[in-house]
Image: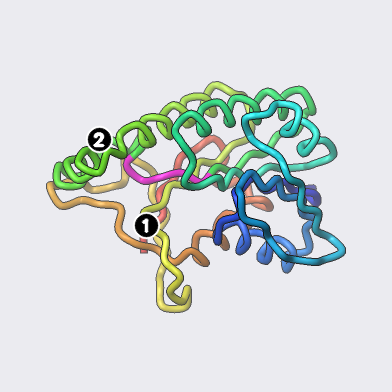
Amino acid sequence: MIKNILILANGNRTGELLIHEALSSAYNVTMLNSGSSSINLLHPNLEILKGSVFSYGDVKAAIAGQDAVIWAVEGEKASATTAGTQNVILAMQEMNVRKLICLSCIGAGSTTTRMGLGFQLITRLKGSNALWEAKGEQEKMLNHSHLDFVVVQVGEMTDRSASTEHLHVLTPSEIKRNFFTHPGRISRTVVVQFIIAQLASDAWVGHTVSLFT
């Protein structure tokens, strides 16, 4: 039974919401904050550590005593995704922590060929190819990790109300592709609620899923 969880984030809004949702679901939460901004939250079941996913020592120390790990690092360089993921996988294997839930991007990895040509052209023009490729490599690493992982891919997250959105969870093969297929927007709260729900569920273990509303 999962009780203690580690959230890897960088002081972003998603990390804060994950903390709130996890605490309200009665988990003991540790957060490794690799960002420059601080998270000003106080709770008896919350510990915030300062460190970096680049540092294997920081990652291993944070994972000690945990039952599950959530990767929610956003806005980092592509190198942080690959090097950080490798550190997390190695530390989890060494510490015998099995469950890893990884927040990623629709259009990376196994959904690269499911997006429309228009979205692919926009991605290239924005210079986002390196990050998308790193997210794809991250997915490959998880597939070979022998961990109980779930890759949760999303489009652009917004702060709009979750109550107005109906969630659709699709595997890559279920995404219908045409020229206009794109990730769309999704409430950050919907994403966070789905991620925390996976801590108590094995429904999507070993899979990459994409969230649409």
- Above or below residue 38? Residue 59 is above
Label 1 sits on a secondary structure element that is strand
Specify whether residue 115 is in view: no
Which dot marks residue 113?
A: 2
Looking at the rendered structure, the kind of residue marked 1 is Glu
The residue indicated by pointer 1 is 156
Q: Position of residue 4 (x, y in %)?
A: 80, 49
Residue beneath the point at 51% across and 27% down? 82
Q: Which residues are magenta?
A: 103-107
Residue beneath the point at 72% across and 50% down? 31
Q: Nearer the viewer, residue 51 or 124?
A: 51
Number of other residues with Cα within 10 Å of mark 2, as a class: few under 14, some 14 to 19, many 20 or more: some
Q: CA distance from mark 2 to mark 1?
A: 18 Å
Q: Position of residue 116 (x, y in %)?
A: 18, 45
Label 2 sits on a secondary structure element that is helix
The quadrant in which the C terminus is found is bottom left
- Above or below residue 86? Residue 101 is below
* Mark before the other along the chain sequence, 2 or 1: 2
